[in-house]
Amino acid sequence: MFEAKSDLKEFSSKQILLLDYKTYTFNNEKWGIGTGETCDMNKMLERKDDLLKEMHKEKKRSNLKGILFSIVDIIKEKNLTLIPGEIEENVVRQAFQVDINKQHIADLGSRISRKKQIIPALEAYFRQKS
């Protein structure tokens, strides 16, 4: 069942980005946060460059301050988040105390729940900045 849910071959990068995607407002700034659940992180990572391009387009199209997309391995409970730009890099680095590698990926470890782990950390970061 997990593998069937993870098979996104027929989906465009835009469809993958927006499949499980929500917008949030932090300090009067709109952010888009998407999640792609998979059993095979490598298949999703093969599309990283296209996903990053689509993230830039969506950021501009929706007038967002920032956009993040987490690739979540639902078996290994691991989160690799795509970081499209400097704004996102600064926020993620400080909010989660992680580094971003040269491939524009932040390893958020076992933080796989957007609702329980990702959004609360971002809210705490922006609350501190207000």
Image (cartoon, grey):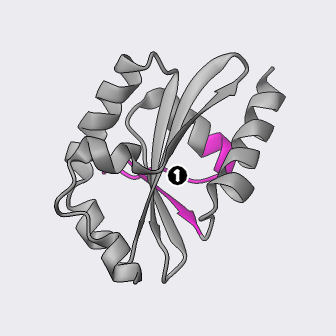
| Element carrying mark 1 | loop
- Observer-nearest of 19 and 93: 19
Q: Position of residue 28 (x, y in %)?
A: 69, 16
| Quadrant of residue 90 within the rendered picture | top right
Residue 37 visible, this angle = yes
Check the picture and name the quadrant holding the N terminus. Answer: bottom left
Give whichever of 49, 54 is nearer the camera: 54
- Residue 58 versus residue 98 in the image, above or below: above
Quick one: label 1, few (<14), some, or many (20+) residues within 10 Å? some
Q: Which residue is mark 1?
A: 99
Which image quarter is the C terminus in?
A: top right
Q: Position of residue 65 (x, y in %)?
A: 52, 21
Q: Which residue is depicted at the point 27% across and 41% down?
A: 14
Residue at 51 percent across and 64 percent down: it is: 79
Q: Position of residue 129 (x, y in %)?
A: 77, 25
* Residue occupying image coordinates x 24% and y 46%: 13
Horizontal side of residue 101 vs 91, given as left or right: left
Marker count (numbered): 1
Q: Residue at x 58, y 23 (%)?
A: 30
Q: Can you give x and y, in whole percent of width and height, for residue 59 in the image? A: 40, 25
Residue 51 in the figure: left or right of residue 69: left
Going by the image, does 60 lie left or right of 119?
Answer: left
Is residue 30 part of the magenta span, yes or no? no
Whether residue 40 appears in this view of the structure is no
Q: Which residues are magenta?
A: 93-109
Question: Does the segment drawn in magenta span residue 99?
Answer: yes
Above or below for 90 versus 41: above
Q: Hey, which residue is sitting farthest left in the picture?
A: 10
Query: Which amino acid type is shown beneath numbered disc 1?
Result: Asp
